[in-house]
Amino acid sequence: MIPSSTTSLAMDDVHRSSDSVKVESTINYYSDGFDDSEDPLFLSDDDFVGDDDGAADALLEDIKEDEIDLLKQKQQDCKILNTTELRQRMEQDVAQVSSVLSVSKFEASILLRNYNWSVSKVSDAWFTDESAVREKVGLLVKTVISCGIVSNKRKIIICGICFESHTSDRIRCADCGHLYCEICWSIYISTSINNDGAGCLMLRCPDPSCHAAIGQDMIDSLASEEDRKKYSDFLLRSYVEDNRTTKWCPAPACEYAVEFSGADGIFDVTCRCLTSFCWNCEEECHRPMDCETVRKWISKNSSESENVNYILAYCKPCPNCKRPIEKNHGCMHMTCRVCRNEFCWLCLGPWKGHMNCNRYMERTDSEDKRKKMAKESLEKYTHYFERWDANRKSKLKARADHQRVKDEEFKKLSLSQDIPEAHFEFISKAWLQVVECRRALEWSYSYGYYLPDNEPAKKQFFEYLQGEAESTLEKLHNCVESELKEFLDVDGLSKKFSEFRTKLVGLTTVTGDYFEKLVRALENGLSDVNSHGTKGLEEEVEDCWCCDRCTYANPSSIRSCKVCGSLNIDNVNE
């Protein structure tokens, strides 16, 4: 079980929002999320007769968001924020700094940008040395000359960029007092916004020797509407990307940001768009693998390192030019395409005058050992990669199948069984469990690849846990994928559907339990393996009995299955 975490965060260091969804977990990461006391799945068959349409519609609206409910249960100290909530938080932080430091909101925004939007860092630096902070960020005390310009609108002033004469009401300046006309200012600001990207947020006075900051007040008064919108978007992106506790969801076209404050070493988060990713490395969720090993695995899959192993295992060097050659014809007469050297494939001797090479002659072990090791390395990699890739593809297909079932088959099933779609939540939960477990199984194979060969006890324990989890997952996947189809074209409520429901719920729970054990064991480095190998594991297995109906492994001390209630037939007969 994952312990509940309610870490208290300093108000200054992270963004706040009273209307954001706070997600805390008190259940297993791979739990099915079922609550037998409240779930409509456990209503009797009579309860489906005479349902009130209004109540059913209301229930349907609640349960259509079952994926969102599940991700809320599984998140780890995570908040999902849309752009409106992000802007509200940003404005709150700006207002707080403005109030505490007695500066304008535009100046407060400049300060926060320079200190990665940390209210506490701004306050600490400001009260330590205000002058140094002003010098660093470009906030200067307003000059007297700017006040004089405003009071005398008829005064003629020459622009410092275009050198044309303008009345003082057409002249602007930053806190430094350098005077430029509004047209030059507009061009300067627009050029920075469109060419410098996010760099426009650090815009300074046009004078090369001046570093006075240009605030958003001048941007809003001098830039076009399109440029103002771009500047506002850059500001919002800075608020997310420069802050250590928030990140954008990596899904294409997703506009949600994720605030994460987990401290238990689990970095898997799920956005409201249902995209799951690792907060730490921004790859897809990869429990039980650590980020560094995932990086190595991905690099290995995309590099040319395995081509080298292939050459070593299946190619031989030309005796003359030493170029690697792969045999592609039946006879042993080889001709190097580079140097045209002719030789025998088996003994690598010259073909001219070659009689036979069937007599065994001892050779040095170094070359044979090198080739053997390369071949074994390639075979090992192929074994784990094929299974990693197969589960990855199965995960993607399960995700697509789940969406198709929700969009198409739920309607057919509702008509054939005369049951509201709201009561099919257990099917969605089963599909989501399949997706989660496929992901865990996928990464468990890369874990197995890097498991040291000199620890056979751990390897045996790992393969046992992985095998048990994979076996139950296959049963669940087959049940939700194949067995559901027989109810699509049946008219009226089928008694078998109730049995199918009980079976699927049981399999979902059992599969989640098995994968929780697998993930926890791998994250703990298989520390349960004792110095005597896997003897303790075998004793544990012998002390259990598996339910014939839902396959749950029950303690031998009980007679009925803890999941589906079926009796242990062997125990009853005794």
Image (spheres, grey):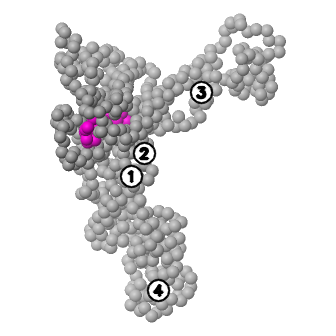
Could you tell me residue 441's position as x and y percent? 40, 30
Amino acid type, mark 4: Arg
The answer to if 562 sits in the magenta stretch is no
Residue 302 sits above or below residue 191 on the image: above
Could you tell me residue 545's position as x and y percent? 25, 17
Q: Which residue shows up at 49% across the image and 77% down it?
A: 186
User: Closest to the observer: 5 or 543?
Assistant: 543
Q: CB of mark 2 within 8 Å of CB of mark 4? A: no
Residues rendered magenta in the picture: 417-435
The answer to if 428 sits in the magenta stretch is yes
Could you tell me residue 97's position as x and y percent? 30, 66
Asked if one can make out residue 331 in the rendered structure from this viewpoint, the answer is yes
Farthest-out residue, right = 353
Mark 3 sits on what residue? Answer: 309
Q: Which residue shows up at 56% across the image and 85% down it?
A: 163
Q: Which mark is residue 247?
A: 1
Q: State the separation of the CA atoms marked 1 and 3.
A: 39 Å
Question: Mostly what secondary structure, the magenta segment?
Answer: helix
Q: Earlier in the sequence, mark 3 or mark 4?
A: 4
Amino acid type, mark 3: Asn
User: Closest to the observer: 91 or 244?
Assistant: 91
Q: Which residue shows up at 22% across the image and 48% down it?
A: 58
Q: Is disc 2 surrounded by few (<14), some (14 to 19) or many (20+) residues within 10 Å?
A: some
Mark 4 sits on what residue? Answer: 170
